[in-house]
Image: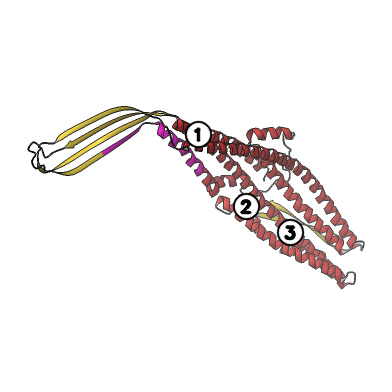
Amino acid sequence: MLTRLICIILLVTLPPLATTGHAVDVALNLNYDTVIVQVTSQEGKTGSSMGLWEIYSLAVNHDPTFQADALTYQADLQKVKQARAPLLPSLSADVAYARNRDEIDAPGQPFIVQGSGNFNSDGYSLSLQQPVYDRGKILEYRQAQSQAKVAELQFDIAKQSLIVRVTTRYLLVLAAQDNLEVAVAERTALSRQLELADERLQVGLGTTTDLYQAEARFRVAEAAEVTARSTLADAYQSLAELIGQVPDRLRILRPDAPLTGPEPDDVQYWIASALHGNLELAVGQQNANVAEQEIRRQRAGHYPALDFIVSHEFQDANGSISGPGRETTFTDAILQLSIPLVQGGAVVSRTEEARLRYDVALRQVETARRAADRNVRAAFQDVTGSIRQVGALDRAVTASESAVEGKQEGFAAGLNTNLEVLDAQRDLFEAKRDYLQARYDYILNWLRLKQVVGTLSEEDLQRAGTWLQ
């Protein structure tokens, strides 16, 4: 009767997990006057929950980091237009208006008009210039096009990074929810074990050592629950940092979510794919191409430039000392050839600097290539290892549950000590935490493998979203 009353109290007083957006089911197994508490996470019965795709869609529009990356990409594309402008015709115009006063004093020179006068003058000039050949400007335009490709690759990296960041923070919330629920279950189970230790001490079947051991574990579990609640709140704020709001509820990972290995299951295939499609490596290779173009652009300082110039000038002076004013008009068509002769060694020095920076870029390409090789091997092993880890931990949880039941039965029969029961419970809850975390690690490892080979896309995120419920 006492046990049933305790069960009812536990059901009523178990703290609700309102912050997690999940209901908590508590299953009590009444065997040998003991209580086994199991806490499972379920979606609530009312309201709508948000999944990975919904969170990602919000992040695309509200994450300041990604928005800055998008704006940077648009700004970098302007460099192409800027580099093309010097190759196009340029037209300039000047307009002038002046108030003039002339004085001429030439004593003893009767043939020179003398005197003073005030008059106005105005005029304008137009100049059209079209580069015919300028190797430096042509190479600068081609270089800007290559730099635009770098900007595009960097924006692709930003998009993949956003997918991983959203998934990571989303799963951090789910992991924090699981950890809180396990902490509540552990604290509840230890609370019952503490009561049993006290009851046995009162009737002379237990010892004060058993009581102190149970109380110590219970207090640690209380502290762990407080920490778990704080961690969950911070995880929600971390997600809100991306989307600009705190979501009410999130969809959780389905118990039957498929854990499939890389296809094909051949690390050499994935390495070859990474060396072909890894975005960091592609950026390095494109930067090396830009650096090589810079050598040619600087060397072009030795080449002549040919420009076609048309100018038209009109001047109108409405008076002069000698009498009436005059109008003058000039129109010129010029084919101008500029030949650099001596520039103090500046072109040679800049060319050598560009060559050295190109060598640096080649070293950076090799660094990126080796990093891609290492990262894809690690990601491949993480995915395959996560699958084995989830299977092993699942069996560990089952075995730990059986161990707890056996220890509790042995404790009730006087065959096991209270400390052995407490140790078994600790092992069970640790196994549960590790099992739940391993499933989230698998998802992240799977996305990172796709990221390192450069194929991670929104379709992969949508696929991961189907594993939620």
Which x, y percent locates residue 354? 53, 37
Q: Which of marks 1 and 2 is nearer the N terminus?
A: 1
Crowding at dot 3, Cα within 10 Å, few <14 / some 14-19 / many 20+, comes out as: many
| C-alpha span from label 3 to label 1 | 59 Å
Residue at the spot of label 1: 143
Query: Which residue range is magenta in the image?
Result: 71-94
Front residue of 261 and 306 = 306
Which amino acid is tagged 2? Arg
Q: Distance between the residues labelled 1 and 2?
A: 49 Å
Overall secondary structure of the magenta stretch?
Answer: helix
Q: Residue at x 78, y 43 (%)?
A: 388
Quickly name the residue at label 3: 183
Say which quarter of the image contains residue 288. top right
At mark 1, the secondary structure is helix
Q: Neighbour class for label 1 at 10 Å: few (<14), some, many (≥20)? A: many
Label 2, residues with CA under 10 Å away: few <14, some 14-19, many ≥20: some
3 or 2: tag closer to the N-terminus: 3
> Which disc, if any, is residue 249?
2
